[in-house]
RNA sequence: GGUACCGUGGCCGAGAGGCUAGGCAAGGCUCUGCAAAAGCUUCCACAGCAGUUCGAAUCUGCUCGGUACCUCCA
């Protein structure tokens, strides 16, 4: 029934059948955030995409070790290997200790991840917690002849490396053109080649964050942290490495180079890259100033938003697009997602109350196949949702007494929705206030209204309905009595 | 400037040589005291031009438009 899982690998540019190196274990590394500011929605999309990967692999029975780092040092303001560490810069600006900055935004990031119902990774290592590993790796790369020290800074020798390995394999760029198009070094640089990047950077006097090393006081380059931490926790060769597409040409290209230069082993079997979230067709990014913070989205306080949207609405919205496509953000699209999400969840709520019949006139097995085939096709969540909406139609139809379902099929249908909607897609019920007291209270009110209706006192019954609607509670009359939903 | 990618109905988005998702919105019908919900139904789109083919949204070429990367970014 369930075909094999296939994953699109950015390096080979092919969709490949997923075969873990050491089944049933799976190692997955995803480049996490640099914690110098709040996580915006574009970041959320990436990590939500990988959350689906993590959840689905787990659902399939794999024992997944998911490592997602926190970059709390070493990330420069630009890639020129000079200038300031992002964390240090922010710390000076806000007159705080660097670790205060790190703490603040790490806490914020985790909180955001939790709100969107992303599972925490198995390991969340920090760059500052792995300085020794990064120094060791740098030493080994120097020993192997692919890096050199120059005035307290260690550079990776791209030219030498590219003679033995395809440096641009991941990005698909032409090496010669890269060499000619990279901007000028500005003269004072110590590197030999213009593509060379820093593994270790000498700290200038004004630098707040620095550590001792064989090359003097300094701090690690950005790319080395992921190489050091991924190989430490997942081995020199592991299954999945992911990140945003914008990391392909530089960060991931350099990561592969570092790993190969250090271990001479191909580090990653499947490279997964997620596409960007756009706003009016433009990439959402901090530098363009068009990024939304999650709390602005929930409260609807951003100028581009007409009103607020809940985390699960946004999650559903993201799942409606494939992770390798750009997704354009708009009020209309979000409103559509909100309605669609409600429709899905309403059907899920009907599931426990459905009555089984002697036989079925709905094809549950086909539905199950459609759902799994979609997920197995490179985590195609839009198709998965489309299939689930076929299920929604079935559920509604059965609920209306227009279709029948056997006991055995009903068990399967409930399991499918439970597994996929909650476990794999990570959607969840968002009840604003319907705890048991409210529920009891509503039951009383609806009974009052029912008796008014029985007396054909429609003025009274409609009055109750209208008043409830005004405070955000919508009453619906069904065959089995009235129900209500609370909206925001 | 170089290199990639993309252009699908009112909107968001799948698909990837013939069977033409899904959600939202809009119209009609059924149900209903009225609503709402639900069900059924209508709306048959693939930037333009040329070509390959029995057949193209899907392949090829060109044109136009857009985006990303090359510089920090998920």
Image: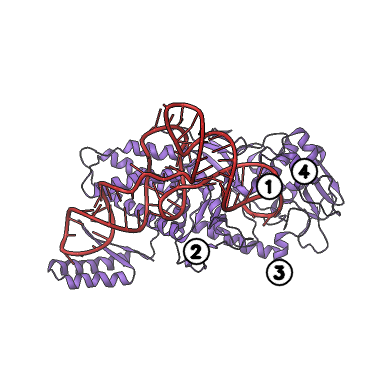
Residue A308, image quadrant: bottom left
Element type at mark 3: helix
Residue A291, image quadrant: bottom right
Q: Chain under label 3?
A: A
The numbered mark, 1 or 3, whose residue comes first in the sequence reads 3
Residue A242, image quadrant: top right
Kindly indicate which chain is depicted in purple in the rendered structure.
Answer: A
Residue A206 at x, y = what percent? 81, 64
Instruction: Tell me whether marks 2 and 3 sit on the same chain.
Output: yes
- Marks 2 and 4 sit apart, C-alpha to C-alpha, by 42 Å
Kindly indicate which chain is depicted in red in the rendered structure.
Answer: B
Which tag is nearer the camera, tag 3 or tag 4?
Answer: 4
Q: Which mark is residue A93?
A: 3
The numbered mark, 2 or 1, whose residue comes first in the sequence reads 1
- Marks 1 and 4 sit apart, C-alpha to C-alpha, by 17 Å
The numbered mark, 2 or 3, whose residue comes first in the sequence reads 3
- Marks 3 and 4 sit apart, C-alpha to C-alpha, by 35 Å
The residue carrying mark 1 is A251
Residue drawn at point x = 28 percent, y = 73 percent: A467
Residue A261 at x, y = what percent? 75, 38
- Marks 1 and 3 sit apart, C-alpha to C-alpha, by 26 Å
Q: Which mark is residue A179?
A: 4
């Amino acid at each position: 029934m369930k075909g094999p899982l296939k994953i699109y690998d950015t390096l080979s540019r092919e969709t490949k059948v997923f075969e873990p190196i050491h089944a049933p274990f799976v190692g997955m590394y995803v480049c996490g955030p640099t914690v110098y500011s709040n996580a915006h929605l574009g970041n959320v999309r990436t990590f939500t995409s990988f959350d689906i990967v993590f959840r689905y692999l787990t659902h399939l029975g794999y024992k997944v070790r998911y490592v997602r780092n926190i970059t709390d040092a070493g990330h420069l303001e630009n890639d020129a290997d000079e200038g300031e560490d992002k964390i240090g810069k922010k710390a000076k600006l806000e007159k705080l200790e660097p670790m205060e900055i790190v703490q603040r935004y790490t806490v914020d990031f985790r909180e955001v991840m939790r709100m969107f119902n992303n599972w925490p990774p198995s390991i969340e290592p920090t760059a500052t917690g792995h300085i020794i590993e990064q120094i060791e790796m740098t030493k080994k790369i120097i020993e192997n002849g692919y890096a050199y020290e120059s005035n307290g800074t260690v550079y990776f020798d791209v030219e030498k490396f590219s003679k033995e390995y395809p440096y641009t394999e991941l990005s698909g760029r032409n090496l010669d053109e890269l060499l000619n198009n990279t901007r000028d070094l500005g003269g004072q640089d110590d590197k030999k080649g213009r593509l060379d990047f820093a593994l270790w950077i000498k700290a200038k006097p004004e630098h707040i964050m620095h550590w001792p090393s064989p090359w003097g006081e300094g701090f690690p380059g950005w790319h080395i942290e992921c190489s050091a931490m991924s190989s430490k926790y997942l081995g020199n060769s592991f299954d999945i490495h992911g990140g945003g597409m914008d990391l392909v040409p530089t960060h991931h290209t350099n990561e592969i180079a570092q790993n190969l230069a250090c271990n001479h082993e191909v580090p990653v079997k499947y490279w997964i890259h997620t596409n960007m979230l756009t706003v009016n067709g433009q990439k959402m990014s901090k530098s363009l100033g068009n990024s939304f913070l999650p709390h602005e989205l929930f409260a609807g306080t951003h100028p581009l938003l007409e009103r607020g949207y809940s985390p699960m609405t946004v999650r559903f919205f993201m799942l409606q697009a494939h992770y390798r496509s750009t997704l354009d953000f708009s009020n209309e699209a979000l409103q559509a997602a909100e309605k669609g999400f409600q429709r899905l969840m309403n059907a899920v709520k009907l599931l426990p109350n459905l009555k089984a019949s002697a036989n079925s006139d709905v094809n549950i097995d086909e539905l199950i196949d459609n759902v799994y085939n979609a997920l197995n096709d490179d985590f195609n969540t839009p198709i998965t949702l489309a299939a689930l909406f076929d299920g929604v139609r079935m559920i509604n139809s059965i609920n209306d007494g227009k279709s029948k379902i056997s006991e055995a099929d009903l068990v399967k249908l409930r399991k499918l929705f439970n597994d996929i909607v909650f476990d794999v897609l990570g959607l969840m019920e968002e009840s604003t206030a319907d705890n048991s007291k409210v529920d009891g209270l509503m039951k009383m009110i609806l009974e009052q209204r029912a008796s008014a209706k029985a007396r054909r006192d429609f003025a009274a019954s409609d009055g109750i309905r209208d008043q409830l609607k005004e405070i955000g509670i919508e009453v619906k009359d069904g065959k089995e009595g009235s129900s209500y939903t609370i909206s925001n």
